[in-house]
Image (tube, coloured by chain):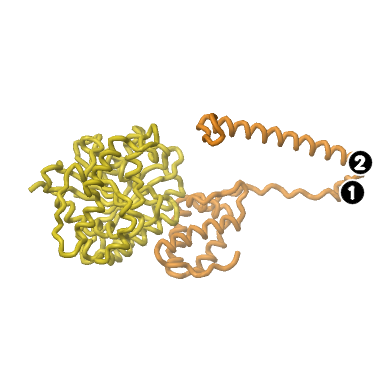
Chain colours: A yellow, B orange
Amino acid sequence: MPASPKTVATINFKGGVGKTTVTWCLAEALSSFSDSRVLVFDLDAQMSLTQGIALNQDTGFLEDRFAKWYQTSKDRKKTIFDALDKFARPSSHFDFPVGLDFVYQVGPRLHFVPSVEDLYWMELDVFDRDGVKDFIRRLLGKIVSSPKLPSYDYVLFDCPPSFTLLSYSVLSCCDLVLIPVNPDFFASYGTRLILSSLKMRIEPFPVPRLRVFMNKARTYGNVPTKETKFYMGEVARVCREAAESEGIDAGFMTAWIPDRVGIKRAIRSGGVPSELLPDFKTLWQEVSTSLT
Amino acid sequence: MSNEFAFRTATEEVEHLALELAETRALLREISQRLGLIERHAKRLLPPTAPKNASSRPRRRPAPAVTPPTISTEEARALFDGLAESLRRGEAVAVDEQLRSLSVPDLALMAKELGVPIPHRPSRRGLYAGIAGRLKESAMLSGRFPQRQSAD
């Protein structure tokens, strides 16, 4: 039986903190500069990551290769929504073989499961919320045992900025939750909300490890500004207090990612800019340590 | 541009903005020149309202002396942490009194350490508001809302 991949879910209930960009940059850096095989899921019905990968950076139009693959996946009912729909049907065996019609090959070691618009309505259609919580766990099992897919070392989930069925399903089974915050009050407050409510939300499942880090850090001379450091200190304190009061493994990482235009364009321009690669490698090293 | 609905390219946008800036600068120069003319004209026409002597000239306030803070950056940070902890415990009045007892240079140092924007000539009121804002954020991030602060 092949080894299960380590799973990381990126989440924050505050939109715009950079969940999608960071998820992608970590996956791209990891798959490009190491021998790791990475699978990325876009679980957000807004489809930001899917659009970023799908759109050609030069023309702004849908990338031909992805467009053809995407249409085929939809025609064969092999999207993430189809998988969930199959799983959620009452008294139905989860018969959903997975292969390269479900997973898109971005690169030799970077594969991707895109989102679909149908996920918008999923919350309204599925009534048995508890019945869906095992979905991601079962789907990962199919991926691991599929002879048509490679063995992945890591699976990264780009979660939506709200507590949806899919995010519930991921949080119930992932190894680590990565929470990017920005140097402002509202992003930091979102962290407190997640840390204080996660245990209650996903019980009886064990709470995964939670790691928070500063994203879009404002810098002066490549050093975080005093304002950024203030919020780093505050979020670190929130993590300590939550770890104590909730009895969870929550920590604030020392690695941080600066606020740079090049990072925002990374998805559509083919990868992390070289001058920012060390920041993402440092971040991943802390993530990797937390996974062991 | 090929037609009126086409968007400008990035280069065209920069050129367009440069043109707007140049036009605005020219406008400001003209306004400044006209104001100067009006001022000179008014001075020739209108008699002075008061005799020019030392007693009637308004006294200029001396520039405030630059006093160094009495605390170090580490002490400022530790002081803030103490105030934040007190506020989280609900001691809003004590926090307010302690903050108001600090000198302007000490407040300015604390505000700087917290990343609060400080104007060229910081006022006690502005510095107090900035630091109080950070204290409230810290308390709210702990899930404890501070009591209503006294009006400054």
- In what element is the residue under mark 2? helix
Q: Is residue A6 left or right of residue A28?
A: left
Residue A59 lies in what quarter of the image?
Answer: top left
Q: In this view, does A34 lie above or below A115?
A: above
Q: In this view, does B57 lie to the left or right of A256?
A: right
Q: Position of residue A56 (x, y in %)?
A: 35, 35
Q: Is residue A115 left or right of residue B102?
A: left
The foreground one among A119 and B46 is: A119
Q: How crowded is mark 2: few (under 14 residues within 10 Å), some or many (20 or more)?
A: few
Q: From mark 1 to mark 2, how far is it between C-alphas?
A: 15 Å
The foreground one among B148 and A277 is: A277
The foreground one among A163 and B134 is: A163
Residue behind mark 1: B50
Q: Which chain carries label 2?
A: B
Q: Nearer the viewer, mark 1 or mark 2?
A: 2
Which numbered tag is attached to residue B45? 2
Q: Position of residue B65 (x, y in %)?
A: 65, 48
